[in-house]
Image (cartoon, rainbow, N blue to C red):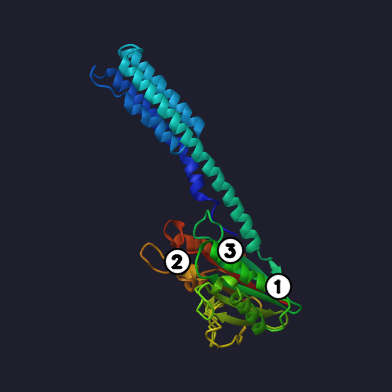
Amino acid sequence: MDPRPPYPRTRRLRESRAVLLSVPFFLIAVVTVVDVLAPPDVHLGPFLVAAPALTASFAGPRTTGFVGAVAVAAQVAVAVARTTLTDLNHTFQIIALVLISAFVTFFAHLRELHEEQLTRLRSVAVAAQQVVLRPLRDRMGPLRIASVYLAAEAEAQIGGDLYAAARTAESTRLIIGDVRGKGLEAVGDAAIVLGAFRAAAHLEADLPGLVAHLEAAVATDPDRDADGPGQPAEGFTTAAVLDIPDGEASLRLVSCGHPPPLLLRGGSVVALQVDHPAPPLGLSEFVDTGFAPQSFSFEPGDVVLLYTDGVIEARDASGVFYPLAERAADWPGDGPDALLRHLCADLLAHAPGGLLGDDAAMVAIERVGG
């Protein structure tokens, strides 16, 4: 779920092209009229080259070529009106205008090819996100689940934030995490964590064993040894891993340096702070604290909100961080999907221009009964 329309900047540009197209035609008309009425020693024809040049910055080669042809026709009309078509000055102006129009039309063609390539890359990014960050099922056991991913760059559609869920015989396990860094390297690290979680979530008997498996997967990534064995790795992943039993009104949580989940119950919001959090995945080899889970009450009707720091670190125009707990408390209560829609709309309204400074992900889980 992404409440923003796809590729908003691209669509706004397309909508504005019709308005922009009036500018070169207005320029041609003004230059033509003024040039015809100007004194004999004043020549404004060279200004006509601006029309196809401006058009090439936002339109395709056909439109650019058409504007160039109109500009040439206007220059011919000026030559006929002022002197003759064979006048040497006007002849060179027409030749120069034809050549420049041809050049900018060719450049418009190259720009159009580049835009088509970007469109294909965006399609690949969307497909990659669907593979790496699969949508969560709406219902898993006694839980209703909703998720949302907001990329800092809408065109990117993918980043280093991650979440996943898996069923075991008696519980549902979930993870949310945030990979340090951005770009393709962060996407690759996120894929490693998600792959390890999906492979082991239903195999490991207990939550500490699952988190230890995730740590081993990150620690054995060959790219982490670039600085030499025994050197602290630059990459790490904060994560919160949960196990929610079907038959108990509770949940177990292991926090690996991740922001605490929020428990929404009866209009109140409580942060599920872990007494002894583990370090982020990828750093546990240097700090031996173990992965001890902590239990919290999770009753029917309760909602747990998982999120990444891109949510709480979003700033408004005055630099104030987004008050997630306060805004979550204002939610009237109508299921996890409605909660995320409420928070996403409020978060994008909080950020200047609806643009986030970092990727943001949220997962809402509601217990609806056994």
Q: What element carries label 1?
A: helix
Q: Is mark 2 on a helix, strand or loop?
A: loop
Badge 2 density bin: few <14, some 14–19, many ≥20, Cα 10 Å: many
Quarter holding residue 254? bottom right
Left/right placement of residue 23 relative to residue 238 reads left
The residue to which callout 1 is attached is 199
Relative depth, front residue between 76 and 246: 76
The residue to which callout 3 is attached is 148
The residue to which callout 2 is attached is 314
Q: What residue type is labelled 1?
A: Ala
Q: Which amino acid does label 3 sit on?
A: Val
Q: Choose the circle earlier in sequence order: 2 or 3.
A: 3
Q: Which of marks 1 and 3 is in front?
A: 1
Residue 370 drawn above or below residue 138:
below
Q: Distance between the residues labelled 2 and 3?
A: 16 Å
Q: Nearer the viewer, mark 1 or mark 2?
A: 1
Q: Choose the circle earlier in sequence order: 1 or 3.
A: 3
Residue 328 drawn above or below residue 15:
below
Residue 8 drawn above or below residue 207:
above
